[in-house]
Image (spheres, helix red, strand yellow):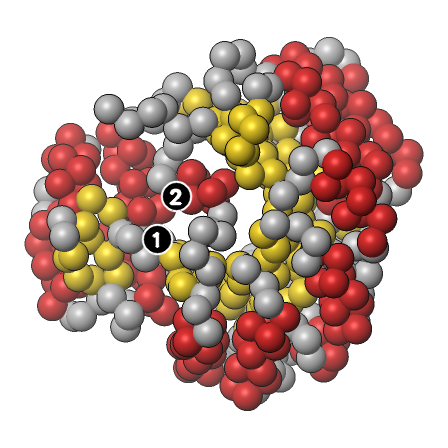
Amino acid sequence: MSPEPGLGVYVHIPFCLRKCPYCDFASVRYHDGLADRYLDALRGEIDTLAPAGRPVATVYIGGGTPTTLGPERLGRVVEWVRSRHEVRPDAEVTIEANPGAFKPHFAEVLLDSGVNRVSVGVQSFDGAVLRSLERIHSSAESLQALAVARRFPTWSLDLMFGVMGQSLEQAIRDAQLAVESGASHVSAYCLTLEEGTPLHARVSQGLTPPPDPGLQRAMFEAVGDTLEAAGLRRYEISNFARPGHASRHNLAYWRRQEYTGYGASAHSYIGGERRWNVPDPTAYVGRVEAGAAPEAGREAETPQTRYLETLMLGLRMRAGVGLEELTRLATKAGEAGFEDRVASQEALGWLERIEGRLRLTRQGLPLGDSVIRALA
Ligand code: SF4
């Protein structure tokens, strides 16, 4: 029997220096007063709600922009997690960093706290693309941040493609520069228009032209080919890694392993139940200060949700999902016609079976979300 996978721990830091117009993450503009109260609340939540008796395999401090807190306060957050959880000596401990803020002092403090993985939100090395995204950092600041990230055993950078005004050549150049930077991991996301964001509103009102889906698809393929040709293997629709550098924390999500989350909007999945915290940082702080749980809701898994999540998360991975297990879950969920739906996506060339696993084909990868929807 394989050993029980360790627990994942996620901590949400909901602050950014300025809100990007395309972003729908739970984050607000940083200010000292709220940040101090938020950290006290976070510590309170970790102290009271940490589930006992589960060794931790991965810790992920994400946001927002965790680096708005500065290295000392971030180091303390890692220490609080360690004080309430048995974090395994070989645990992966990740911090998300934004260029501009991520200076050499971060490496000194965070390496001491046991952080061994950094993910830098570069988005693009091209000044025009950064301006189109209204990012507040420059490509020179990205290069400085990457010089700091190199001191960590694993370091990743995020790229964004499909940005308004971005050419195919610019997207390929970004992928080439990511390779040249020596990153051990790259996440490459296509810009999506999320409802409720200023960018979505501008496009809906005709003030900004919408991204071109044909060009976005060409970029998906060209960026992926560039990264893979350089030895960064695609292990998930948007994620590429050199051998041994895939994100263990994110793989655990896609494999539906258990995790606990702290902070505003954080989700947990433990004992067949999902629960989530209030998304608004001020509401989160208010609840914890009043001695109440910050939880906004919880839901027990059902055969349907187990089937759908296994399908949706499993097919994101290049390794795909065990077909026998998926068929068993579909039957339990009363999903009549599952096998016919798989067969029709196979006939279209979007799905394939490899050694008992079902996965997206190379042609199916850029259409991943719609293939998954057709199966669900
Ligand atoms: S820095 Fe990241 S989390 Fe913050 S607003 Fe921009 S995209 Fe969203």
* Tag 1: amino acid: Met
Report helix, strand or loop for mark 2.
Answer: helix
Q: Position of residue 124 (x, y in %)?
A: 65, 72
Q: Position of residue 224 (x, y in %)?
A: 43, 72
Rendered residue at 11%/68% (across/down): 347
* Tag 2: amino acid: Trp
Mark before the other along the chain sequence, 1 or 2: 2
User: Can you tell me whether the CB of the residue at mark 1 lies under 8 Å from the nearest atom of ligand 1?
Assistant: no
The residue at which mark 1 appears reads as 317
The answer for how far apart the CA atoms under marks 1 and 2 are is 7 Å
Displayed quadrant of residue 264: top right
Crowding at dot 1, Cα within 10 Å, few <14 / some 14-19 / many 20+, comes out as: many
Along the viewing direction, whichever of 30 and 47 lies nearer the viewer: 47
Q: Quadrant of the N terminus?
A: top left
Q: Judge left or right: residue 11 versus residue 269.
A: right
Image: 322 above or below 177: above
Q: Position of residue 61 (x, y in %)?
A: 65, 39
Q: Position of residue 309 (x, y in %)?
A: 33, 40
Labelled disc at residue 67: none
Rendered residue at 53%/82% (across/down): 172
Along the viewing direction, whichever of 138 and 84 lies nearer the viewer: 84
Crowding at dot 2, Cα within 10 Å, few <14 / some 14-19 / many 20+, comes out as: many
Labelled disc at residue 254: 2
Rendered residue at 20%/44% (across/down): 322
Image: 34 above or below 160: above
Could you tell me if residue 103 is visible in this image? yes
Displayed quadrant of residue 342: bottom left
Along the viewing direction, whichever of 283 and 332 lies nearer the viewer: 332
